[in-house]
Image: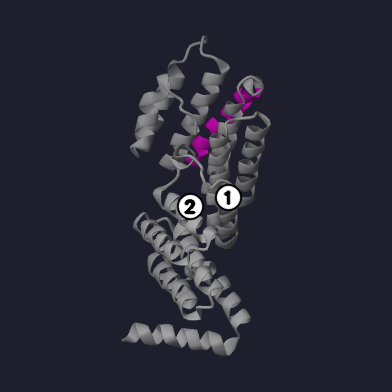
Amino acid sequence: MSDVGGPFDAALTSLAGGDHARASRLIEELRSSMGGDASTAVRSRAARVAATAHRLAGDLAAAEECLAEAFLLAIDVSNDDPLVAVEAELEFGDLRRAQRRHDESAAAYDRAGRLAEDAGMPQAVQWKIALRSIDHDLTVDPMRGIERLQAFSGEVPDAPEEAISGLPSSLRALLRALDPVARGEVDRALELLEVAAAEARKNQDVPVYVASRIAIAQLYDGNDDHVGAYRSAATGWATLRAAIGPTAARDAFEPIMLDFRSRWGAAAFAEAKSAVESAADT
């Protein structure tokens, strides 16, 4: 999240380029070469960057070890340089997310947000942390993630580009789509949500794809277009089933389908389903 430069540049360049194994090697070489004159903050950041590199390279055990060191070092400098502690908490959240320990991940993102707020960090930094937490929610509970993203979009409609620049392109597209949703510009919102869904599908970003299709379905439902709502959810279900399997697809889209059936009634739900299936057959 921070612009850790200088001795970290080569490793960070490799990370940004997707060469995670090279990044891991470079940052470990740097850590090995650090002398006693390296500050505690620099050594903590080096351990945190190493944890990130190892996590992205798939070595979660090495990431865990490096992150533990980063936290121990951060304790000594957190008062003078709170960003060190924030970065460590964010990486802890990312690591627990990779391990599918989602409660711990969510708690880490919350701690990072509180630390940043208490330290009076720039608003753009706090927004980045909030969006990291929301992105996690989109993975675990898409409907809650959408609600939080909509609330965030309403609170910061003019968030500067630097606040979202580090996010995946599909999540940026979804975030931008929510502005017309909040303004009630249905046609424009649907257009941008379809763009977000397409971007997420291209990038194989399952959480944002699910969130985009659900948001489209909710928008149609809010305008009493049962056919459009069912079509969006059914399209998402079918696409996800083909991409990652029937269980994940059902987990993602069954809740909103059951909600539609409950609120519309069995007859109206069946009518919408029939209309979508008939259109697909023609």
Residue 196 vs 129, above or below: the answer is below
Residue at the (48%, 84%) spot, across then down: 272
With respect to residue 251, does 163 lie above or below?
A: above
What main secondary structure does the magenta stretch of the protein show? helix
Residue position for label 2: 175
Q: Mark number for residue 249?
A: none
- Residue 114 x/y as whole percent: 67, 37
Tag 1, which secondary structure? helix
**Dot 1 surroundings within 10 Å: few (below 14), some, or many (20 or more)?**
some
Q: Earlier in the sequence, mark 2 or mark 1?
A: 1
* Label 2 packing within 10 angstroms: few (<14), some (14-19), many (20+): many
Residue 121 is situated, as x and y percent measured from the top left of the image, at 60, 30
Q: Residue furthest bottom?
A: 267
Per the rendered image, the range of residues in magenta is 59-75
Residue kind at label 1, given as amino acid type: Phe
Q: Position of residue 37 (x, y in %)?
A: 51, 9
Is there a contact, CB below 8 Å, between mark 2 and mark 1?
yes
- Quadrant containing the C terminus is bottom left
Q: Is residue 227 visible in this depiction of the protein?
A: yes
- Residue drawn at x 57%, y 47% is 133
Q: Which residue is mark 1?
A: 152
Q: Is residue 3 magenta?
A: no
Total numbered labels placed on residues in the image: 2
Return the residue nearer the eye: 84 or 46.
84
Q: Camera-side residue: 204 or 2?
A: 2
- Against 94, is 138 above or below? below
Report if residue 100 is visible in the image: no
x then y, percent, for residue 197: 41, 61
Q: Is residue 37 above or below residue 166?
A: above
Q: Residue at x 40, y 22 (%)?
A: 29
Mark 2: which secondary structure?
helix
Q: CA distance from mark 2 to mark 1?
A: 9 Å
